Amino acid sequence: MRVGLANVKWQTAPASSKRGEVVVGIAPESREYGLTRGKVFPADQATSLLNPLRRLVQSPGRTVGAMGLPPDATVLEVGSGPGFFSPSIARALPRGHLVVVDLQSEMLVIARARLGQAVNASVAQADACELPVGTGRADAVFLATMLGEVPDRDRCIEEVRRVLRPGGVVVIAETRRDSDFIPMSKLRALVERHQFSFVERRGMAWQYVARFQTREA
Ligand SMILES: C[S@@+](CC[C@H](N)C(=O)[O-])C[C@H]1O[C@@H](n2cnc3c(N)ncnc32)[C@H](O)[C@@H]1O
């Protein structure tokens, strides 16, 4: 469902991207979600995702470095949760724009607070399978430990492919500490069947950041 502004449910910051109009908050239709138990990571446990010790093992700075973002990029962070990575991404985009997307508004409240006064960031409540962004508008999409919660991962990656410009990248961070961990071999098979080429993997088999670039049909 892609909707007009009349249906906007969530939008706390203006879309200031040079490419404009990327943000529309939508209310996702209710349906069963992942964790293989039919639910998403519970918002009432959001603070566990912000545990300072996590920074030691899954550094936001190193992760964002692996994304290789130009400073004027338009980036979507999908399934942001409470925004563990969001401030680091926003800082890497002094002339760009970050759109932070999650299904759960409670997560976005925390993410927005963590982004502080950042004027180059917006939040939008939406389903990863129906992103509130026009076709070919994004330079990069970032998914961290969220894909395993999406029941239809092919549809999600197809949607990511739709919003990326030609040559755009999707960067996916996974860790085995997440109960929905996706091993690299499975991830490659999934992403590459949607017109992406594998670029690189950083990290270890149990915790990695993988980058893929769109390719022509
Ligand atoms: C395990 S948390 C990870 C959050 C964050 N990426 C991190 O690494 O700290 C997964 C997040 O993905 C979100 N999520 C799950 N399925 C989603 C979907 N279909 N669309 C958008 N967000 C989704 C959940 O609401 C949750 O906030």
Image (cartoon, rainbow, N blue to C red):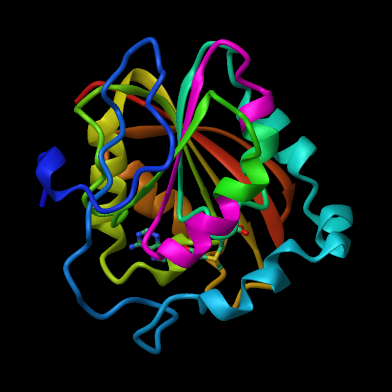
- Residue situated in front as seen by the camera: 92 or 187: 92
Is residue 40 at all visible to an observer of this figure?
yes
**Would residue 118 appear left or right of 24 to someone viewing this image?**
right
Counting from the top left corner in percent of width and height, residue 180 is at 52, 74
Residue 95, magenta (yes or no): yes
Quarter in which the C terminus is drawn: top left
Q: Quadrant of residue 178?
A: bottom right
**What residue do we see at 72% from left, 73% from top?**
48
Counting from the top left corner in percent of width and height, residue 5 is at 15, 39
**What residue do we see at 46% from left, 29% from top?**
75
Residue 140 versus residue 128 in the image, above or below? above
**Would residue 189 appear left or right of 127 to someone viewing this image?**
right
Q: Quadrant of residue 99?
A: top left
Residue 142, magenta (yes or no): no
**What residue do we see at 58% from left, 42% from top?**
210
- Residue situated in front as seen by the camera: 167 or 115: 115
Q: Quadrant of residue 184?
A: bottom right
Residue 29 versus residue 90 in the image, above or below? below
- Residue situated in front as seen by the camera: 101 or 142: 101
Residue stretch in magenta: 90-111
**What residue do we see at 39% from left, 82% from top?**
39
**Would residue 1 appear left or right of 192 to someone viewing this image?**
left
Is residue 3 at all visible to an observer of this figure?
no
**Would residue 162 appear left or right of 167 to someone viewing this image?**
left
